[in-house]
Image (cartoon, rainbow, N blue to C red):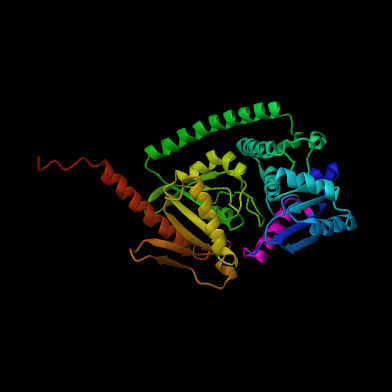
Amino acid sequence: MSEQAGNGGNAISAILVQLDFGAGGYAENLAEFELLAASARALPQAVIRGKRQAPDAATYAGKGKVEEIASAARLHEADIVIFNHELSAGQQRNLEKALGCRVIDRSALILDIFAQRAKSHEGKLQVELAQLQHLSTRLVRGWTHLERQKGGIGLRGPGETQLETDRRLLGKRVALLKERLKLLERQRAVRRRARTRQDILTVSLVGYTNAGKSTLFNALTKAGSYAADKLFATLDTTSRRLFLAEAGQIVVSDTVGFIRDLPHALVAAFHATLEETAGSDLLLHVVDSSSPDRDQQIASVNQVLGEIGAAAVPQILVWNKIDATASDPGIERDEYAKITRVRLSARTGAGLELLRAALTEVAREHSLRIQLAHEPPDDAGT
């Protein structure tokens, strides 16, 4: 694999592997996998499919399938083989030996995309920490080739720094990154307490990656945040004040997108950023209503919200991209008249005024609760 390719200059030749274990959603998972590979600037030469009852302990795919992958890699002179599965260190090592080229799994692929997207100082620290924690599980005898690798899918770090494979040095670097992130976390907590003292409603946009959160954030706040039709376009949390005519100021934050099987190292590294979500008064759960896999995507987001302690934060589903489904804008309520869903298109603006009305309603209820909480107790009966 060329240094130029690793630095993002050219796409690199890749063989994609996805096996079917009968769990369902195979086509949707494969489509997402291909989009992930493209986001990492991989150029897929072939997609190897297959059915198995369970992963092979040694090579995950089994002897016959490994031979098929090897033939495809030789035929297309592939630089890398990417599995849309979680590989153990032993499986990865055995596959590299059998295939004669680099092999990475789904977690390393997602980590690489995060490394490309990280822009802020904190974002880069978080990604490096996640990469080093993932790498630490791979530090076994026979992996000295990593000492000579720089860049490339699954190894690219912010600034293209060489990953140090010595356990002692790696441990010291991890400890340093954690300390720096703790400092940034304390600074964020101070800002969060200041907002709480001002009794301002805080709203976080959450959702599956590429659901349209940043487009909606820009439409609401005119923030001009980066928005693109690709996975993980936003890594750094951005907050803006939004004035609502009948409710005053609220704070709206755009957050990193979620994805199924998000690497645990990433969830841990981004925990400080994601805590901003758990501390919100309201979550706008943005859903790509045009996706055939939307129910699974909603479940994946809610799973991550549970992991970061945000499961109890009130949600409103934002049914985005109705322009792609020919649906009408609208507001849906439950049997208690609580708003549960707003149908809109962040791209065209259709239904945006309904979301503003929903936020106004929530903000006024929030202000009323704060007002009642601050009222002195009724001591007329004493």
Q: Nearer the viewer, residue 108 or 247?
A: 108
Is residue 348 visible in the rendered structure shown here?
Answer: no
Q: Quadrant of the N terminus?
A: top right
Residue 24 inside the magenta-drawn segment: yes
The range drawn in magenta is 23-42
Residue 190 to residue 27: above or below = above
Q: Quadrant of residue 144?
A: top right
Q: Quadrant of the C terminus?
A: top left
* Spot occupied by residue 203 in the image (x, y as percentages of width and height): 46, 49
Label tally: 0
Q: Nearer the viewer, residue 339 or 61?
A: 61
* Spot occupied by residue 186 in the image (x, y as percentages of width and height): 50, 31
* Spot occupied by residue 200 in the image (x, y as percentages of width and height): 40, 44
Q: Determine whether, in the image, residue 181 is placed left or right of residue 358.
A: right
* Spot occupied by residue 300 in the image (x, y as percentages of width and height): 55, 56
Q: Determine whether, in the image, residue 178 is placed left or right of residue 66.
A: left
Q: Quadrant of residue 2?
A: top right
Q: Which residue is rendered at x = 13% and y = 41% of the image?
A: 379
Residue 373 inside the magenta-drawn segment: no
Residue 362 to residue 133: above or below = below
Is residue 57 visible in the rendered structure shown here?
Answer: yes
Q: Nearer the viewer, residue 324 or 58?
A: 58
Residue 120 to residue 96: above or below = above
Main SS category, magenta section: helix
Residue 84 to residue 196: above or below = below
Q: Nearer the viewer, residue 248 or 2?
A: 2
Q: Which residue is rendered at x = 50% and y = 42% of the image?
A: 275
